[in-house]
Image (cartoon, rainbow, N blue to C red):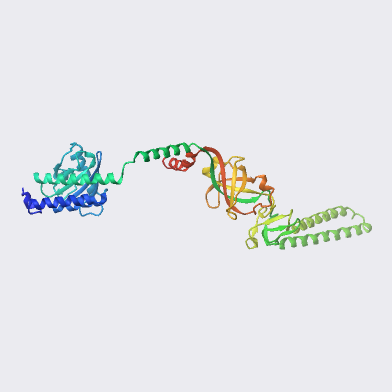
């Protein structure tokens, strides 16, 4: 074994004492725990030659490597850190050691494939209380008795400084502040039982209360729309013109067929006065004339349908002429909506998580995008039991609300198509539940509790 003097940096005991006192002064002047740990794992090398110095934090039987010499940061998940913590648990926890502990790494290296360049280790606790942690010193030769006393003194210095910094950072609450804290906590708990109405927000849109849809009477192609979108129309006003080429040709052919049937009937009638036996043909020709007239009337009716007229007055609502011009439509497909601007209601796209609030008669406050500073009062009229898929891919309940009489009879009804946000008021519930319902829902959906 080599002598301690060969590995001690100070040449005299006086210099060693001076270095120890200087190191103690640096520890006492450290402003925070991070700076103190940096001093503890790097500056003791002025006293003794060391391989590594590690600051070990402890909580029960669990160890954490908080700082290491010559390292700015220490990753606690590395194989080295796990291997070192395993050795600390074996040497310190299992032996219930409260004093300085020295061991040889060779025993641990034989059990695992991990190799460590330094053979000897010494753990010096900060105090006899084991939960405070300590300093771990490693090097390639063992420690002498005089070095044990020196390292124990170092651990006590840094342990005392660490406790002082923790007490400074977390001062005890005095009685007056503690009473104020308890009062605030009691008030908060009491306030959590105050009943408040459960509210939910959902997108809303103003729609017609009883719209009339102008639909295609047959399969065909739209030639043009005869009224601009969103204009007031009167009953009987032309709205839509279809391409009528085939229907007009059918009418001409039917008209010619009727003329032919009438001519044949007249000729047979004249012959009946001259030639006997021709009167029997008149009945068949009368039937052909009636059939030809029916074909002409049907063709006339179909031709008349190529120009659709407004069945009632109101506001003609559709997207744009460019979208409908030249478009092929099926029988019964809606083209134009005729709405009464004085009879409107609210369509609400309620998210799935507020389905319990959709009760008939529930109070609703509507905030329109066009008038964000004012609100309109309404009440829920109906709501679907099953959610529907929206154009954006989301699922929502479709609900409808009507304005309360004060707004329904007024002159400030919103325009059809205006969008906004509806605030739905549900059943009363404690304020604490109202504040925590969303976190509770997220926890249940995440963990299934």
Q: Is residue 344 visible?
A: yes
Q: Position of residue 298 (x, y in %)?
A: 77, 55
Q: Is residue 415 left or right of residue 389?
A: right
Q: Is residue 225 left or right of residue 385?
A: right
Q: Position of residue 399 (x, y in %)?
A: 60, 45
Residue at image position (59%, 45%) is 364
Vertical side of 440 occupied by 310: above or below: below
Q: Is residue 238 left or right of residue 121?
A: right
Pick whichever, 187 or 247, lies toward us: 187
Q: Is residue 306 visible?
A: no
Q: Position of residue 159 (x, y in %)?
A: 21, 44
Exactly how many numbered labels are in the figure?
0
Question: What is the residue that sits farthest to the right in this orientation?
Answer: 273
Quadrant hosting residue 181: top left
Quadrant hosting residue 173: top left
Q: Is residue 61 left or right of residue 18?
A: right
Residue at image position (64%, 59%) is 328
Q: Position of residue 64 (x, y in %)?
A: 25, 45
Pick whichever, 98 or 254, lies toward us: 98
Tell me the quadrant of the picture where the C terminus can be found.
Answer: top left
Residue at image position (86%, 52%) is 283
Quadrant hosting residue 131: top left
């Amino acid at each position: 074994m080599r002598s301690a003097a060969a590995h001690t940096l100070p040449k005299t005991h006086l210099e060693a004492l001076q270095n120890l006192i200087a190191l103690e002064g640096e520890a006492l002047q450290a402003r925070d725990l991070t700076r103190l740990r940096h001093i503890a794992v790097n500056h003791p090398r002025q006293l003794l030659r060391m391989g590594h110095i590690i600051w070990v934090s402890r909580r029960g039987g669990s160890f954490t490597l908080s700082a290491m010499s010559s390292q700015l940061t220490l990753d606690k998940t590395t194989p080295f850190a796990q291997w070192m913590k395993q050795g600390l648990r074996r040497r310190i926890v299992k032996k219930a050691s409260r004093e300085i502990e020295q061991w040889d790494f060779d025993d641990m290296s034989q059990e695992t494939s991990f190799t460590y360049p330094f053979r000897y280790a010494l753990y010096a606790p900060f105090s006899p209380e084991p939960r405070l942690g300590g300093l771990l010193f490693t090097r390639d030769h063992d420690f002498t008795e005089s070095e044990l006393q020196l390292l124990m003194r170092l651990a006590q210095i840094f342990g005392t400084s660490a406790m002082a910094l923790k007490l400074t950072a977390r001062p005890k609450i005095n009685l007056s502040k503690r009473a104020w804290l308890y009062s605030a906590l009691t008030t908060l708990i009491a306030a959590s039982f105050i009943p408040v109405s459960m509210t939910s927000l959902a997108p809303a849109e103003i729609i017609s209360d009883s719209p009339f849809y102008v639909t295609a009477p047959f399969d065909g192609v739209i030639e043009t729309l005869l009224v601009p979108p969103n204009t007031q129309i009167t009953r009987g006003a032309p709205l839509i013109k279809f391409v009528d080429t085939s229907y007009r040709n059918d009418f001409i052919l039917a008209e010619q067929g009727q003329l032919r049937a009438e001519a044949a009937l007249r000729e047979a009638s004249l012959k009946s006065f001259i030639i006997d036996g021709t009167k029997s043909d008149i009945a068949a020709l009368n039937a052909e004339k009636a059939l030809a007239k029916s074909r002409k009337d049907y063709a006339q009716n179909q031709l008349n349908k190529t120009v659709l007229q407004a069945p009632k007055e109101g506001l003609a609502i559709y997207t744009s002429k460019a979208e409908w011009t030249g478009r092929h439509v099926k029988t019964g497909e809606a083209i134009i909506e005729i709405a009464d601007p004085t009879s409107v209601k609210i369509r609400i796209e309620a998210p799935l998580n507020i389905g319990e609030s959709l009760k008939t008669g529930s109070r609703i406050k509507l905030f329109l995008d066009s008038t964000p500073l004012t609100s309109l009062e309404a009440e829920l009229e109906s709501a679907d039991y099953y959610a529907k898929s929206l154009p954006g891919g989301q699922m929502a309940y479709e609900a409808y609300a009507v304005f309360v009489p004060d707004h329904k009879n007024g002159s400030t009804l919103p325009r059809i198509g205006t969008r906004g946000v509806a605030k739905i008021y549900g059943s009363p519930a404690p304020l604490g539940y109202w504040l925590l319902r969303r976190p509770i829902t997220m926890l249940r959906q995440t963990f299934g509790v």
